[in-house]
């Protein structure tokens, strides 16, 4: 089963950290990406660009609107994600615990449709 680990934090927080803290955090990310890659459990990994570059597509009535920005309800934004192959939710949570803590919140969700058909996802 595939699980997504979604990375939430305040935009610009990471960039305001001292350079040595940034490098230490990125070192952990690189090490984990290598570990997951060697296990064959690593899916997509992405850093999302600032929300100032985001657009929202939303249907209202019969119209489809394209709006500037993400229109998030909180000050924390989705900044990136991992997609991992894990046996269980508990395993996915354990993998999220390995990510740098204290600078972001990590939401773990099981994915549907990834690598299979909708019928297989029951």
Image (cartoon, grey):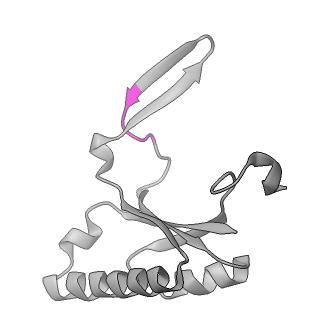
| Image side of residue 60 versus residue 14, left or right | right
Q: Is residue 111 above or below residue 36?
A: above
Magenta residue check for 70: yes
> Residue placed at 63% from the left, 14% from the top?
61
> Residue placed at 42% from the left, 41% from the top?
70
Please identify the quarter of the rendering in which residue 5 is found: bottom right
| Image side of residue 65 versus residue 51, left or right | right
Q: Does residue 99 appear in this view?
A: no
Q: Position of residue 81 (x, y in %)?
A: 46, 64
Q: In which quarter of the image is the C terminus?
A: bottom right
- Main secondary structure along the magenta-highlighted residues: loop
- Front residue of this view, candidates 99 and 32: 32
> Residue placed at 67% from the left, 84% from the top?
91
Magenta residue check for 96: no
Please report the bounds of the magenta region as a residue range: 67-71
Q: In this view, does 85 lie above or below 54?
A: below
Q: In which quarter of the image is the N terminus?
A: bottom right
> Residue placed at 49% from the left, 88% from the top?
98
């Amino acid at each position: 089963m595939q699980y997504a680990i979604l990375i939430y934090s305040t935009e610009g927080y990471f960039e305001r950290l001292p350079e040595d803290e940034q490098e230490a955090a990125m070192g952990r990310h690189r090490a984990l990406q290598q570990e997951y890659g060697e296990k064959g459990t690593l899916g997509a990994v992405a850093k999302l660009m600032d929300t100032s570059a985001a657009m929202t597509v939303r249907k209202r009535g019969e119209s489809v609107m394209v709006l500037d920005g993400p229109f998030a309800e909180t000050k924390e934004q989705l900044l990136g994600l991992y997609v991992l192959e894990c046996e269980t939710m508990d395993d996915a949570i354990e993998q999220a615990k390995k990510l740098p803590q204290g600078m972001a919140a990590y939401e773990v969700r099981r994915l549907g449709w990834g690598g299979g058909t909708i019928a297989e996802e029951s």
